[in-house]
Amino acid sequence: MTTTNGELLGLAFMAFFIITFSSTARYYVKFLCFILFSVVCAVGPIPFMLLRPRDYRNALLPAYLCRKFGAILGASFEVRGKENINQQHGGVVLMNHQSALDLIVLAYLWPIIGRATVVAKREVLYMIPFGTASWLWGTLFIDRNNRSLARTTINKESKAINDKHAKILFFPEGTRGNGDSLLPFKKGSFHVAIESQGFIQPVVISKYHFLNSKAKIFNRGKNIIKILPEIPCAGLSKDDILPLMDRVYQQMQTEYDALSDESLAINNLSKSL
């Protein structure tokens, strides 16, 4: 049994109708497209990545493609605070974590932050071929079930902060949170910052008002990424971890509130035009 052009056109029209008028269908279709395209962007350049394994520059082309596709899906970002970046030394970069779409945020930061290395759970490594590409651009994989081993792994890598001027990117909440408040921070990234006696660079991303996983909503929206001034950790010891965590948390929460209110106003205004 063959399918006529008319039947194909009818199926295409039906799919377009469903996606246009069903927010749930649009949510799943957009996320499926995002996942598939992210894999294609990451995997496509692997042959070239093999020429310089574990090099952060391997992610530059995938990052460029990810930014462009994110804009097509409707997830656009404005980056502020680039003047606060100092590529002449390493540090720990802390970002709030909301969704798998944070991959787009990383795509914006990667070309401007310097010698970047992101920390991810070990399970990502086994998501072949995406995990292979992630390893090739220098992702640091940790076993969250073994805290001692995870801390040892990260502390060894933290030497790169001083030796190679590397920037190690963390999601200090440890898991995704898209509410009005940031989740409590975990200590790991702060141990690394104090161990290296380097700098912490907070990066705050406004709330994804366009995205609601529970309600299955994935609309268009403008978001703000703000790079805050560095916080020096020179002279601090492990006894200073809790006060440092509280200081950084309060600073990022205050900025999160302000940016989220601003992005909501911008998106509401664009809807009314």
Image (spheres, rainbow, N blue to C red):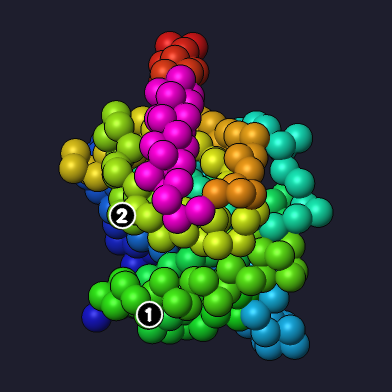
Over which residues does the magenta segment extend? 237-260
Please give left or right for residue 189 compared with residue 121 in the image.
right
Q: Position of residue 263 (x, y in %)?
A: 47, 23
Which secondary structure is most common in the magenta stretch?
helix
What amino acid is at disc 2? Answer: Thr
Please give left or right for residue 211 compared with residue 139 in the image.
left
Q: Quadrant of residue 29?
A: bottom left
* Dot 2: element: loop
Q: Which residue is mark 1?
A: 149
Callout 1 crowding tier (Cα within 10 Å): few <14, some 14–19, many ≥20: few
Q: Which mark is residue 175?
A: 2
Please give left or right for residue 259 compared with residue 168 in the image.
left
Callout 2 crowding tier (Cα within 10 Å): few <14, some 14–19, many ≥20: some
Q: Position of residue 51 (x, y in %)?
A: 75, 87
Viewer-closest of 32 and 265: 265
Q: Considering only vertical position in the picture, is 76 above or below 143? A: above
Q: Considering only vertical position in the picture, is 36 above or below 80? A: below
Residue 92 belongs to magenta span: no
Residue drawn at (56%, 36%) of the image:
225
What amino acid is at disc 1? Answer: Leu
Residue 245 belongs to magenta span: yes
Viewer-closest of 152 and 177: 152
